Amino acid sequence: MTISRSSGVLLHPTSLPGPYGIGELGQHARTFIDWLHRAGQRYWQVMPLGPTGYGDSPYQAFSAFAGNPYLIDLVALREHGLLTESDFADAPSFSAEKVDFGLQYVWRTQMLARAHARYASGGAGHLRPDFEAFQAAEAEWLDDYALFMALKEAHGGLPWNAWDAPLRDRDPQALSEAAERLRDTTERVNFVQFLFFRQWTVLRRYAAEKGIQVIGDIPIFVAMDSSDAWAARDQFYFDDQGQPTVVAGVPPDYFSETGQLWGNPLYRWDVMAADGFQWWIKRFQGSLKLYDVIRIDHFRGFAGYWEIPFPAENAIHGRWVPAPGHAMFEAVLGALGELPIIAEDLGVVTPDVEQLRDDFQFPGMAVLQFAFGGGDFSVNDFLPHNLRENQVVYTGTHDNDTTRGWWRAADELERHNFRVYTSSDPTEETFAPMLTRMAFDSRARLAVVPLQDLFNLGTEARMNLPGTTGDHNWTWRYRAADLRPDLATGLRALTEATGRL
């Protein structure tokens, strides 16, 4: 992938403002795109857009192909005649600053069910041809996903490997009977997906008209409780009971003495290779329907991954297993042509990971918050003068503290190293703008900054703290008034001054 010198902003759509408790794909999203355009930005980076479950992480979705129903613009549904004013009469009082996912699960699910019921009873008939065409075009993943979600609902939310054995094991007769019994539910799931993709397609078209491309994620692994794992069980290491025999994670390191136990099922690469990696070809095809540029999360797992026996209390007792990344990418690129891919190559990167990245000329990543730790920090790969052109530089990511929060919590060695490197003594107020300027000044062709850093917000605006769950993760939202015109003017001036306009 060849990137021209440019810049962008990282913001997940859930963080957009709006009246109904979570960001939506409507007017506030278009306003944000307009702001990016005025600010001279070329990219809007988002996190995975799939439907989230327990923990609300966009990196643990019920499907690698489906869209998140929470993002559907309800105002547009009212305009289409799928909702009425009376449907909004019992709307709860929502926070403007934080997403309450539990409230969204109850209220928004009810609203979407009302919209589908109105459609099923003959309302919004103008949508029928497009809905039927969508179901036909996406049937390969949509049929499994709709039945999966219907069965989860029928089982009170239990994971698929806790269902009755015939359904767990996808017995054809059991699936046929379930599909007939749950037809109303599966059609509702299908219709909600149609609404999401219809709105997202319109929004992406609007962004393209403003010269904005969308960068989105492929998490390397799928969730254990997902339609992907249930429908393609032979592609993963599962036993006869649907339990994983090994799971994903990372080994102990500087950040964690026990490593990270993610729990995702691991791929049967031998099975995938046998049919030319068709599963991955379809997955990339699905992602291209969502994004203009694909960022592969945990790219190093395509060179080698940490395999942990299941069950396990932590990630200590695992082993490194090589992965056929070269063969997989050759198959995908051979089928789909050159792809716009960014490799998330953070963490411990070994020569085989670098070789895989460079052989396909994928740009890697650098995070400036990581540049100033350690004694002899001058050799740190993330220092601005050590960055490569074919790289994407960030001040921080969704898994980091905000840049202002990072400086507040930085140890004295990191502060000292920054002062020496920049011949400056920043304050908490001036640090984030300085780091943003360093990212834009760098030789990396693409610079991306989280919106929180452009707003100069502290730890209270952090998006995620890895390894934790709770209502502090994934919930941050900005207020419409925060997206000030003067910030766009300043960002545009910086973008022009650093040759990224």
Image: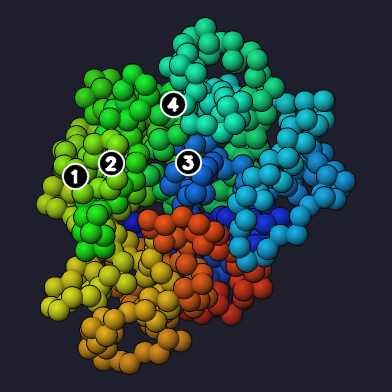
Position of 498 relative to 274 (above/below) = below
Observer-side mark, 1 or 3, equals: 1
Position of 147 relative to 288 (above/below) = above
Q: CA distance from mark 1 to mark 2?
A: 8 Å
Badge 2 amino acid: Ala
Q: Which mark is residue 61?
A: 3
Q: Secondary structure at mark 3?
A: loop
**For the residues bearing labels 2 and 4, Cβ distance under 8 angstroms:** no
Q: Which residue is mark 4?
A: 161
Q: CA distance from mark 3 to mark 2?
A: 22 Å
Crowd rating for badge 4 (residues with CA inside 10 Å; few <14, some 14–19, many 20+): some
**Would residue 288 be found to the left or right of residue 207 on screen?**
left
User: In x, y percent, where is residue 379?
Assistant: 14, 73
Q: Which residue is mark 2?
A: 312
Q: Which mark is residue 426?
A: none
Q: Earlier in the sequence, mark 2 or mark 4?
A: 4
Q: Earlier in the sequence, mark 1 or mark 4?
A: 4
Q: CA distance from mark 2 to mark 4?
A: 18 Å
Residue at position x 34%, y 49% in the image: 297
User: In x, y percent, where is residue 171?
Assistant: 46, 11
Q: Which residue is mark 1?
A: 317
- On the image, which quarter does residue 479 sit in? bottom right
User: In x, y percent, where is residue 37?
Assistant: 55, 65
Crowd rating for badge 3 (residues with CA inside 10 Å; few <14, some 14–19, many 20+): many
**For the residues bearing labels 3 and 2, Cβ distance under 8 angstroms:** no
Q: Secondary structure at mark 2?
A: loop
Crowd rating for badge 2 (residues with CA inside 10 Å; few <14, some 14–19, many 20+): some
**For the residues bearing labels 1 and 2, Cβ distance under 8 angstroms:** yes
Badge 4 amino acid: Asn
Q: Quadrant of the C terminus?
A: bottom left
Q: Earlier in the sequence, mark 1 or mark 3?
A: 3
Residue 2 in view, yes or no: no
